[in-house]
Image (cartoon, helix red, strand yellow):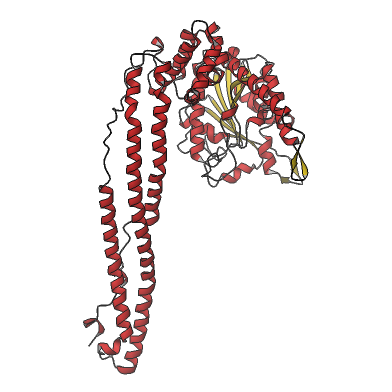
Amino acid sequence: MSAGATIALVGVSMIPDLPADPASVAAAATAVRASVDGVADAGRDAVRRWGGLVEVHETPETATAVARLSPVDDAAAEWATAATAIARALEDYAEILEQQKREIDQLHREIPGFLAGLRSFQRSQREQFAPDGEDLPSHLLFDPSHLVYNDDLRARCQHVAAMLDIAAETCRSDLGAVSGPTTSLPPASVPAPLSTLGPTGIATLDDRVTAAILDALVRAAGTDADADAVAALLAAHPDYLDVLAAGTADPAAVAAWWESDVVPGSALAAALITGASLAVGGLNGIPAPARVAANRETAARRLAAARAELEDTPAYIHQGRTLRSNASERAALEAEIAYLERVAAGERSLYLYDPRRERIIEMIGDPSRAAYSITYVPGTGTDMASYYSGGVQSVAQYLVEQDTTGRSVAFVYTDGPWASWGLPFQETSNANRDFARDEGAQLARFEDGLRSDAQLASATRVGIAHSAGMSVLSSAEVAGAEYDQVKSLAGSWLQDGWSAREGTDYAHHQYGFDAINYLNPFYDTPQESSAFVQHEYAPSTFLGIQNELDNHVRVDEGPRRNSEVLRDLYREIHE
């Protein structure tokens, strides 16, 4: 009698498949649970932030708008409860999946081993008891231990299948038991325009929120154009500055408001420049002279604070039983003070200055005469202190000063914490595509603001970027920014979705073999892109050995070591 006639052998085909990856289910649970606090906090923050709108913005629509907020907090709390239940159900399911995955992996190891051992045993039995190939009875083909192990393996396969079915059904049941929302939120459609700013035509929700804040600033100034009252309003509502700093309002609408409602040069304009300097100095659409004046006010306040900090920073501090030098801290403050003194004296012009948010854009040149508007986007590691020495402004400074007609203006741009060295998942890493995409969208809004300035609207637009700045600039193009010319100075990778814009002239400049070229096999870079005209310059060498890092730094410097690149840039821009 053959073995197969009476014994049902286990097989790998009996091992059930996992219906879902436990790690993916666990990750989904983590994501849902992570949203709990965020949604609840956002609901409370929305009510807190805008609940007081009636105190500063009285229109027929204000009370209705605030009333529409009332269920938001309750809805957020309901979501938090539901999300917690969903996360718990997914976590339980993931735990059982992980347990059964371990058992499935073990069965995949044991069953082939058992069958191989059984075949070896049966081969030995046939050689001994049936050398001529006759059938053997099952008691000679199976040792009792084989039968026990076979039954155990079959039972374990069936148990795993049953556990997976039970786990899936339990998860479905738990998810189905999650209560639906009971709080009714108003529809998401945007209501009729607020009764503010009349002819400026503000249309989007972001524009309406901005309009409400700007109108509140004007109302706070009153007929006396009281700058102190404006400052007091912003001190009481710091969230207003958060909204304005996002820069999402239409620059053309802001420009129209400044021109028609505020009126450049008026007492009201002066009150807003002084009392709301952070707002005026950072709002796209406000003309350059007003922004520079506002940022000079902000810089003056920071200058006073920095001087006080320096006085309070001793040369040495006790650290245990030793004295530690404070030289680096004092040197940093001294450099900042020297720079801000030049701003106060009018020797440096800031188009944007918000030190708490690490936002700074230095303007070089006279925008009222500009036929060329140059945006310079620096590379990895640029920060506020980079401006104090003048190094980060070197390329832009040269291009403006070389134009003896005075028709060039340049903006050295770092709006917020800038690209840093790090891994792709780190927030400001120069390898983080999402970071570059967000910064690029912000840069595109900045360019829209320049176009809304009557003095700059018709200027030839030039974008120049060094290193990681090119990732930001290409992201700005993806977001809709338009340049007449784009210049890469040893530029890093181009953003996903980027393509050369018709009508834009592209050029790439570098010395010899640049450190950034190590990215070429992995990314789309300007040096590899056919859209860019390539310019390669002889590197500094010693006995034929190049310094790739020095090549990378040099192309961003002033004329002492970088004159050939700078001359070519100037020629390309003006030819």
The residue at 27%/69% (across/down) is 158
Q: In the image shown, does 138 or 547 lie closer to the viewer?
A: 138
Figure check: 39 above or below 230: below
- Residue 532 x, y percent position in the rendering: 55, 34
- Count of residue discs: 0
Q: Is residue 45 visible?
A: yes
Figure check: 344 above or below 500: above
Q: Quadrant of the C terminus?
A: top right
Instruction: Locate residue 380: give its quadrant.
Output: top right
Instruction: Tell me if 228 is positioned left or right of 11 in this view.
Output: right
Q: In the image shown, does 338 or 571 lie closer to the viewer?
A: 338
Figure check: 263 above or below 62: above
Instruction: Tell me if 402 is positioned left or right of 140 in this view.
Output: right
Instruction: Locate residue 84: give its quadrant.
Output: top left
The residue at 38%/14% (across/down) is 58
Instruction: Tell me if 374 is positioned left or right of 128 in this view.
Output: right
- Residue 161 x, y percent position in the rendering: 28, 65
- Residue 72 x, y percent position in the rendering: 34, 31
Q: Is residue 283 visible?
A: no
The residue at 25%/47% (across/down) is 177
Q: In the image shown, does 429 or 173 lie closer to the viewer?
A: 173
View extreme (front): residue: 321
- Residue 131 x, y percent position in the rendering: 31, 93
Q: In the image shown, does 427 or 309 lie closer to the viewer?
A: 309
Q: Quadrant of the N terminus?
A: bottom left
The residue at 39%/13% (across/down) is 196
